[in-house]
Image (spheres, rainbow, N blue to C red):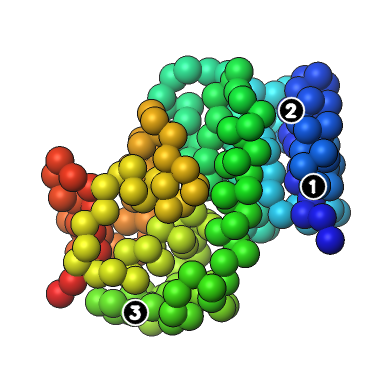
Amino acid sequence: MARTILIVDDKREIRTLLNDYLSQEGFRVVEAADGQEALFVARNEHPALIILDLMMPEMGGYEFMRVYSREADTPIIILTARLEEGDKVLGLELGADDYVTKPFSMRELTARVRAVLRRLEKGGNGGADLLQAGGVTLDRQTRQVTVGGDAVDLTPSEFELLAIFLAAPGRVFSRLELLDRLQGEAYEGYERTIDVHIRNLRTKIEPDARKPRYIETVYGVGYRFAAG
């Protein structure tokens, strides 16, 4: 069965372009013109992934994410025509898995869509079903994470990032390597995505995110999960 993708953008020509292209790629596509309509469509269609514009009337992308993230953990790729780094960072901090800046390449966007969906489909095929280190437990089958016995809710990207670390405690990963593992291809200039996901992950699993116990920064190189 074709995976359903929800496209949310106030510009009809953008929705039509994405609909036509993604439909040809084998996806089932549904649309919404703003965040309010997107809530209605998402609640009824239960999409596998959402492609979300940030700047829209009625309800913008940021507000949509704030509301919908309390109802479902559907992965989101944000579209932004704005160039400020803060816009991209805020979208990732609100739970988006990736971002693409307009104007965008359809080939690149489709590759990112497939990469996010592959992460969800991995299940137990990406290694051991149960990963544990330092009081952190990750179950690939149930997609549950606990820290010291307490359940933690993670976005799909945060979940996969933690799985990468837990599978190799003590190993140092560069930003580009982590980006490549998350997306299937490392796009130059998108390393900042990893930094934001790391910050969000630390906020959720660290006793004190300002003094990380689990995810350590290796300056000039990247990150690692503390082996001890």
Q: Can you tell which of label 1 and label 3 is closer to the viewer?
A: 1
- As rendered, which of 140 and 31 lies closer to the eye? 140
| Frontmost residue, 138 versus 174 | 174
Q: Quadrant of the N terminus?
A: bottom right
Q: Which element type, helix, strand or loop, lies under badge 2?
A: loop
Q: Amino acid at mark 3?
A: Gln
Q: Is residue 116 above or below residue 140?
A: above
- Would residue 168 be seen by someone viewing this image from the given angle? yes
Disc 3 designates what residue?
132
Q: Which of the two labelled residues, at mark 3 and mark 2, occupies the earlier sequence position?
A: 2
- Rendered residue at 40%/46% (across/down): 179
The residue tagged 1 is 27
Image quadrant in which you'd find residue 132: bottom left
Q: What type is the residue that disc 1 sits on?
A: Phe
Cβ–Cβ below 8 Å for labels 1 and 3?
no
Residues at circles 3 and 2 in contact by the CB criterion of under 8 Å: no
Q: Is residue 163 left or right of residue 106?
A: left
Indicate the position of residue 222 as horizontal and vertical percent values. Answer: 23, 47
Mark 3 vs mark 2, foreground winner is 3
* SS label for mark 3: strand
Q: Earlier in the sequence, mark 1 or mark 2?
A: 2
Give the distance between the C-alpha atoms of the residues marked 3 and 2, in whole angstroms: 41 Å
Task: Measure how far apart labels 1 and 3 are at the Cα level.
Answer: 35 Å
Instruction: Say which residue label 2 marks.
Output: 9
Please name whichever residue, 107 or 101, is drawn nearer the observer in this view of the structure. Answer: 107
Characterize the local packing of mark 3: few (<14), some (14-19) or many (20 or more) Cα atoms within 10 angstroms: some
Q: CA distance from mark 1 to mark 2?
A: 18 Å
- Residue drawn 79% across the image and 25% down it: 17
Q: Quadrant of residue 146?
A: bottom left
Q: State the image coordinates of residue 228 (x, y, percent, origin top left).
A: 15, 74
Instruction: Report the amino acid beneath label 2.
Output: Asp
